Amino acid sequence: MNDKKIRVRFAPSPTGPLHMGGVRTALYNYLFAKKHGGDFLLRIEDTDQGRFVPGAEEYIIESLKWCGIQPNEGVGFGDGPHAPYRQSERKPLYRQYAEQLINSGHAYYAFDTAEEMEALRKQAEAEKRTFSYDSFTRGQLKNSTALSAEETAQRIANGEAHVIRLKVPQKEEIQINDLIRGEVVFHSDLVDDKVLLKSDGMPTYHLAHIVDDYLMKITHAVRGEEWLPSAPAHVLIYRYLGWENEMPQYAHLPLLLKPDGNGKLSKRDGDRLGFPVFPLDWQDPSTGEKSAGYRERGYYPQAFVNMLAFLGWNPGTEQEIFSIEELCSAFSFEHIHKAGAKFDPEKAKWFNEQYLRHASEQEIAARLKSVVANTFNIGADDRRLSENYLTQAVVLLKPRVQFEAEMPEKGNYLFMAPDQYDQQVIEKKWKENSRSFFVALANAFSTSSTFTASDVDTLVKETATTQNIKPGDIMQLFRVVLSGQGGGVDLTGMASLLGKEECVARIELALKKIQN
RNA sequence: GGCCCGUUCGUCUAGGGGUUAGGACAGCAGAUUUUCAUUCUGUAAACAGGGGUUCGAUUCCCCUACGGGCUACCA
């Protein structure tokens, strides 16, 4: 068992954009596979034709690519020895296994219609019970355990719609050994007769994932905790199919919870609290409804992945910043916390900030170039678009933002002269001698041969002294004159970057516009 | 309702029969700074409750409470 090659899968259904919780599940699968030199594959569980959403599969693939969680086998990733990896394309495979279960007496045909089931459920609800299709009720329902063999055969021969259900035994204890939770015991009396094959001939998740996991030689099934209640049915299916020895080890992951209040994290929470719940932007093809993605919000995929990894897992050390390679070697199921994790959008930003701090200024500058050009309408040969200028701008801006995309807006004064000036600062700091100070400063700038940050510092202080002003009294005014704003990047660094001519021009502009 | 899983600072979590219960985010205070940040320092903040077991429980067991999940011909 232990010498088998580790094979895990991520098996989402294409019913919409991939939720960040799903990405985390994929990530844990990936980390576990890589840690043990195993395989990680992507299987698309599209057995519900009614819930299929166009574009969802592509979205899943693109999301995994963006995150750097690359399957080495599966839909969108070159398939592999077990193709196809899309369950709808494997449809003919499943019926034989359902029939095998019927033949061995572990499953049966059921002819109850959806309407009949609905009525039963309503009635039970009215009596404050829950209807369950199980070992206690199946005898009174329309299925091959209750009907005669002739009638069953007749109905099938007539082409009557039917499903195949698992025949769950009474009075058995079903134990599953979960990698995260240890031994969990269920009583079979409380397990319902799950539908294995639907009336449209498609398998349900229960049958399909088992057949595929078996055929695809999956060794570990890592999935969300919402699957734990149906795990005993899965154990039974493996057992009755004769595959119990090949059954993968199950690991049920804790869920991602809402930041406030209770319940699992949903799309609504993102809208309500203003953070993305999905890796990429998504627009619902039928409603046109849009959902924000981490990528478009400006998150680095590495930061997103790092953040996700720490939601329910920890390395057991105090290190928090991990590359995906480091995550691979540090990962283990023992360090997965059992309780659900409330998602904290603030911490997510913090992770991005950490990656931003360590990002290369040159690379950020290169990425920002076209945005800056467009935003400020700057021609290609302008010095403000030079690598050097942009890089210096990034150096100044980097410590004050959490996302590199904030930089152009936050540092707009590095790319264009202000058109208005912070009135509060002007009123408070502008004195009768201010005008003469700036005239003198412009003069001093003009005659200076070099213009480094420390040159600016010296020139400002010298001018202040000759004008009989304390440097502290004009520093913020100087900032407003140059940028229009009372706060911002390092002042002398900014002046130096803007350059002598631009500074002089901005002083003259300010002198014209500020009336005091 | 039933079944299953869970419960350490506000949040993510470490730890584990004897600890000053550790870290991070957020908060607060201070230092630095021309501003806003960054950075640094400091600070406040937790073992849900009750029973056991034990010389000793936050740690092990049970109960309760609370939270979560499931209870479809959805996954």
Image: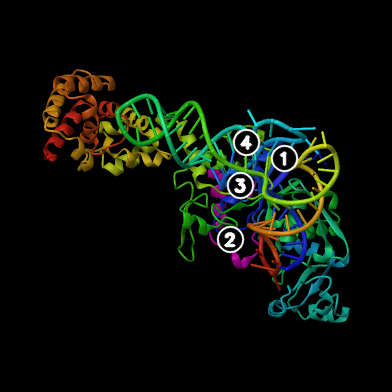
Q: Are marks 1 and 2 in contact (CB under 8 Å)?
A: no
Question: Mark 2 — residue?
Answer: A15
In the image, residue A492 above or below residue A195: above
Q: Distance of mark 3 from mark 4, alpha carbons? A: 13 Å
Q: Residue at x 45, y 35 (%)?
A: A356
Say which of marks 2 and 4 sits in front: 4
Q: Amino acid at mark 2?
A: Thr
Q: Are marks 2 and 4 on the same chain?
A: yes
- Whether residue A70 is visible, yes or no, is no
Q: Residue at x 78, y 67 (%)?
A: A192
Q: Are marks 1 and 2 on the same chain?
A: yes
What is the residue that sits farthest to the top in this orientation? A449
Q: Distance of mark 1 from mark 2, alpha carbons? A: 32 Å
Residue A134: x, y in percent? 80, 70
Q: Are marks 1 and 3 in contact (CB under 8 Å)?
A: no
Say which of marks 1 and 4 sits in front: 1
Question: Mark 1 — residue?
Answer: A334
Q: Is residue A59 magenta?
A: yes
**Which region shows up in magenta?**
A46-74
Compare residues A265 and A16 and report the one nearer the observer: A265
Q: Amino acid at mark 3?
A: Arg
Q: Distance of mark 2 from mark 4, alpha carbons? A: 29 Å
